[in-house]
């Protein structure tokens, strides 16, 4: 009889599903918040800082290691840079959410997943294997279809799609910076630091942006901060350390499915044939890019 899996592995997949589902409601919450998009991004980050710091200390305490034991001046600088990238990513994404469909906002922002192998190919001169090449091709075709359909519908939708792609670029930069820090700091303290620096970066942008800064209705903002940033991101960060990449990819596909459903039911954003085809290609890319890459070095 095989031994029972350790508790971490047993709970990792349910945690990944719950975290991914929580993140999927973020675009809807941004839409219904009564503040400007950058203000909602600021509140999402700032309200999550203290809970994430407490969570980082709790997790590190259970593991018997100091939460910020590997932190030095260089690491702090990289964490600040990650926070800046994360803040710009959120700012562009929140602006894009208000200008395109919820499905496109979620799918195109996930372009960070296949921008990472593109970075390795162009900058690091790594030869991509067949899954990575197929993913890049599918992503390019799917994105072209989504952008073309948005341009046909309205310039506003097209602008929203471009903003979401811009967000994906900065999220890729955020992930690359985080990767440099993972050998020095644990995942949860890293998320807490990046969130704190991101909130500091977002504050002047939120104050300078036209529109409301202080919420009249705090419910969407609180759910965005605790549901997306603390609960959603926290569970995903916990789960990815215990799951294979292809499983992570499958779980992340819950996000565009939920966002598309909310967009159709709440805002009448029913996708047509071309949107479904483009979305299907992007979904295929998200799966292919997580398959084992057997390319020659």
Image (tube, rainbow, N blue to C red):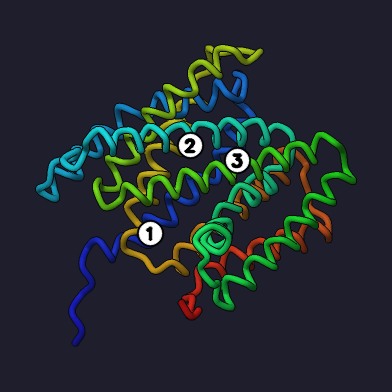
Comes first in the chain, label 2 or label 1: 1
> What mark, if any, has residue 14 been given in the picture?
1
- In the picture provided, is 46 more to the left or to the right than 264? left
Which sits in the foreground, 214 or 204? 204
Residue at the image point whose x is 45% and y is 62% from the top? 248
Which sits in the foreground, 212 or 162? 162
Residue at the image point whose x is 50% and y is 45% from the top? 173
Quadrant assignment, res 94: top right
Within 10 Å of disc 1 (Cα), the crowding (few <14, some 14-19, many 20+) is some
- Quarter of the picture holding the N terminus: bottom left
Looking at the image, residue 282 lies above or below residue 68? below
Comes first in the chain, label 3 or label 2: 2
> What mark, if any, has residue 167 been given in the picture?
3
Q: Secondary structure at mark 1?
A: helix
Residue at the image point whose x is 49% and y is 36% from the top? 85
Within 10 Å of disc 2 (Cα), the crowding (few <14, some 14-19, many 20+) is many
Comes first in the chain, label 1 or label 3: 1
Q: Position of residue 109 (x, y in %)?
A: 61, 47
Q: Position of residue 246 (x, y in %)?
A: 47, 69
- In the picture provided, is 226 more to the left or to the right than 87? left
Q: Secondary structure at mark 3?
A: helix
The residue singled out by tag 2 in the image is 86
Quadrant assignment, res 121: bottom right
Q: Position of residue 168 (x, y in %)?
A: 59, 46
Disc 2/disc 1 C-alpha distance (Å) = 26 Å
- In the picture provided, is 162 more to the left or to the right than 246? right
Which dot, 2 or 1, sits closer to the camera? Answer: 2
């Amino acid at each position: 009889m095989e031994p029972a899996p350790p508790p971490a592995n047993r709970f990792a997949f349910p945690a990944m599903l719950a975290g991914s589902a929580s993140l999927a409601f973020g675009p809807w919450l941004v839409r219904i918040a009564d503040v400007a998009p950058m203000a909602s991004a600021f509140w999402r980050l700032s309200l999550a800082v203290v809970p994430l710091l407490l969570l980082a200390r709790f997790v590190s305490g259970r593991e018997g290691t100091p939460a910020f034991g590997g932190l030095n001046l260089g690491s702090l600088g990289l964490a600040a840079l990650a926070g800046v990238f994360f803040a710009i990513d959120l700012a562009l994404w929140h602006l894009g959410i208000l200008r395109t469909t919820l499905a496109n906002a979620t799918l195109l922002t996930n372009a960070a997943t296949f921008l990472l192998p593109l970075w390795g190919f162009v900058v690091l001169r790594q030869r991509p294997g067949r899954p990575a090449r197929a993913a890049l091709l599918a992503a390019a075709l799917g994105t072209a279809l989504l952008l073309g359909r948005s341009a046909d519908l309205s310039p506003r939708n097209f602008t929203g799609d471009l903003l979401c792609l811009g967000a994906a670029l900065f999220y890729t930069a955020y992930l690359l910076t985080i990767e440099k820090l993972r050998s020095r700091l644990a995942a949860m303290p890293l998320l807490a630091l990046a969130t704190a620096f991101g909130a500091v970066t977002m504050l002047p942008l939120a104050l300078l942006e036209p529109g409301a800064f202080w919420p009249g209705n705090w419910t969407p903002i609180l759910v965005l901060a605790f549901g997306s940033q603390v609960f959603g991101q926290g569970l995903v960060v916990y789960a990815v350390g215990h799951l294979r990449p292809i499983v992570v990819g499958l779980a992340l596909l819950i996000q565009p499915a939920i966002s598309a459903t909310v967009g159709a039911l709440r805002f009448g954003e029913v996708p047509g044939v071309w949107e479904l085809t483009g979305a299907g290609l992007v979904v295929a890319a998200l799966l292919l890019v997580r398959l084992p890459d057997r390319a020659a070095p």
